[in-house]
Amino acid sequence: MEFIPFTRPTIDEATIAAVSDVLRSGWLTSGPKVQAFEAQLSAMMDGRTVRSLNSGTAALEIALDLIGIQAGDEIITTPLSWVATANVIVLAGAKPVFVDIDPVTRNIDLAQISAAITPRTRAIIAVDLAGLPVDRDALYALAQQHQLRVIEDAAQSFGASWNGRAIGSFGDLVCFSFHANKNLTTGEGGCLVLPDPALAPLCEKLRLQGVVRAADGTMEVDVAGGKFNLTDIAAVIGLGQLPHLTEFTESRRALARHYFEKFDRALGCELPVADLANSNWHMFQVVLPLDNMSISRGEFIARMKAQGIAIGVHYPPIHLFQLYRGLGYQAGQFPHAEHVGAGIVTLPLFPTMTTADVDRVCASISTVLTEVLS
Ligand SMILES: *Cc1c(COP(=O)(O)O)cnc(C)c1O
């Protein structure tokens, strides 16, 4: 029986050949492939200015820099995300202010944000968990009402949309990740979509040591930039992925639909929102009925592995990590994030998976859970 991973990148032979060509070309770092990749990303984002970076985290770090975040500023975000979302706030010297999630969407509960706003609040980092977009109409209405900037942590929602508009093609600063497990990958990589092309020079400076080169070849540095540029090796992988993005997303959506058809609801798991229009189905996650189970989540994962199926955990709530407890957060503060974080599991979902694989995953979950449910 073949092992089913929880995700797997889809790289075609043409992309592998294109990577070889770059390796033979003598130009490995940022060059013509990066420029071509950025141009295609921009076209996808309705012509908005896009700058490629070597990670999604870099995009978040630069976004915070671009809006001038300083020590003492507060940034509102979700406790249920990859820890990068909050780490970049700490790295910028600002304070992460968590707001609990909506237990249905598992994204930040927009209705609870107002109560967390103080005179020091500068921005909201909204995360589209599993590729399900945060309600953009409500998000931007709220931001406008309170004069806050928005950083969209769209690391998981590349290829997703909001009412027919591609995520990234509108809004404030939008950050994408092209990590190996994301819907579109460059191995490692990311990009930042800018709300104003005039920000591009500063973004480029922050991306590469603060260096500005004049036409005569001389250089000047007036800000300590980082080292966040993408290589041409990575960019050419992205160029090979982009033509398949629609097909990747459609395949994921069809598999998600199949999960909804085949998943046994009588087991008592909490299913994701059945959004078959906006979400890019980066992940299909269910929350286990831990209260009625005689085994832990870890034991459930081990039993699924014994059946040849990999199960992921995305994510433990950020505020319960040592670093964040040290900032004053504690268990009990965000009950929905804690409940979902404790029981959530990521089921296999990737474009080359088959509906028969989905059937097998659903059958194995039924077998494992039926034995341990009280
Ligand atoms: C992957 C991810 C990031 C970070 O992206 P990297 O490319 O790994 O740096 C940030 N936020 C979320 C929600 C992610 O899933």
Image (cartoon, rainbow, N blue to C red):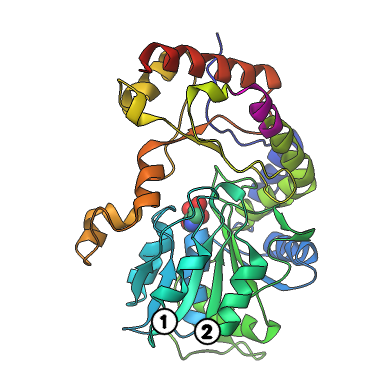
Quadrant of the rendered structure where residue 134 is? bottom right
Specify the segment rendered in magenta: 256-263
Residue 186 position (above or below residue 162): above
Q: Nearer the viewer, residue 75 or 293?
A: 293
Quickly name the residue at label 1: 121
Quadrant containing the N terminus in the rendered view: top right
- The residue located at (52%, 84%) in the rendering is 146
Q: Position of residue 149 (x, y in %)?
A: 54, 80
- The residue located at (40%, 67%) in the rendering is 88
Camera-nearest label, 1 or 2: 2
Q: Nearer the viewer, residue 169 or 262?
A: 262
Give the residue type that dot 2 points to. Answer: His
Specify the principal SS of the magenta part: helix
Mark 2, Cα crowd under 10 Å, few <14 / some 14-19 / many 20+, is some
Mark 1, Cα crowd under 10 Å, few <14 / some 14-19 / many 20+, is many
Q: Position of residue 126 (x, y in %)?
A: 52, 64
The Cα–Cα distance between marks 1 and 2, rounded to whole angstroms, is 9 Å
CB under 8 Å between callouts 1 and 2? yes
Quickly name the residue at label 2: 146
